[in-house]
Amino acid sequence: MKIKKPIRVILADDHAIVRRGIRRILEKASNICVIAETGTGAGALRLVQELEPDVLVLDIEMPDMQGIHVARELRTNHVPVSIVILSAFDDNYFIEEVLQVGVDRYLHKSESPAKIREVIHQVSQKYIPAIVLLFAVSLPRVGWIFYQAFASASGLPSDINFL
């Protein structure tokens, strides 16, 4: 029987009490390990580079750097981390904007603990940017081309069919 390694998570939220709550939620799952926390965007960038987590759980509103800018920088530099935005914002335009940056999932802070853990498990499986999935749903042929290019560059299986 192969033992699965734990999903390594970094939490980035400017409210310590929120980080503590999310940590407790995530660590109820035996295979999720919160390896670090930070209250700043710059701290999130530094910790992701140093610790190479599987997942970054990121707030949008932080004092030094907005979460969308953190996500954009990580994607621009092709850092292989799954990014989950956990925010109180629920504006559809805003959600679409963060997904276009390459965030893997957007969750509202009112989500259930079980849903948050489920999403962490899902995004840790394979890193496929949300924009590729967005194309796959809205324009299947274009989505397939984008996915093939991404899979080729990332070593992911290329046998997924969007058509």
Image (tube, rainbow, N blue to C red):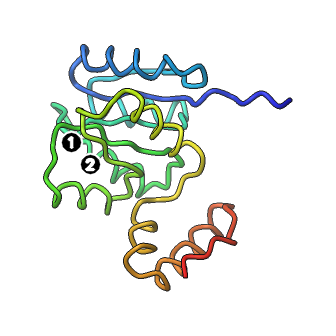
Looking at the rendered structure, the number of numbered marks drawn on it comes to: 2
Q: Quadrant of residue 16?
A: top left
Residue 59 in the figure: left or right of residue 52: left
Q: Is 152 displayed left or right of 34 in the figure?
A: right
Tell me the quadrant of the picture where the N terminus can be found: top right
In this rendering, would 20 be left or right of 125? left
Amino acid, disc 1: Gln
Give the residue number, with chain letter if any, for mark 1. 66
* Nearer to the camera, 145 or 14: 145
For disc 2, the marked residue is 69
Amino acid residing under circle 2: His
25 vs 159, left or right, is left
SS type, badge 1: loop
What's the CA distance linking mark 2 and mark 1? 5 Å
Q: Secondary structure at mark 2?
A: helix
Of 88 and 115, which appears nearest the observer?
Answer: 115
Q: Looking at this view, is 126 or 14 the one in front?
A: 126
For mark 1, does the 10 Å Cα neighbourhood hold few (<14), some (14 to 19), or many (20 or more) residues?
some
Q: Which residue does the image show at 38% across and 58% down from the upper left? A: 102
Check contact, mark 2 vs mark 1: CB within 8 A: yes
Q: The C terminus appears in which quarter of the rendering?
A: bottom right
Q: Residue at x 25, y 39 (%)?
A: 108
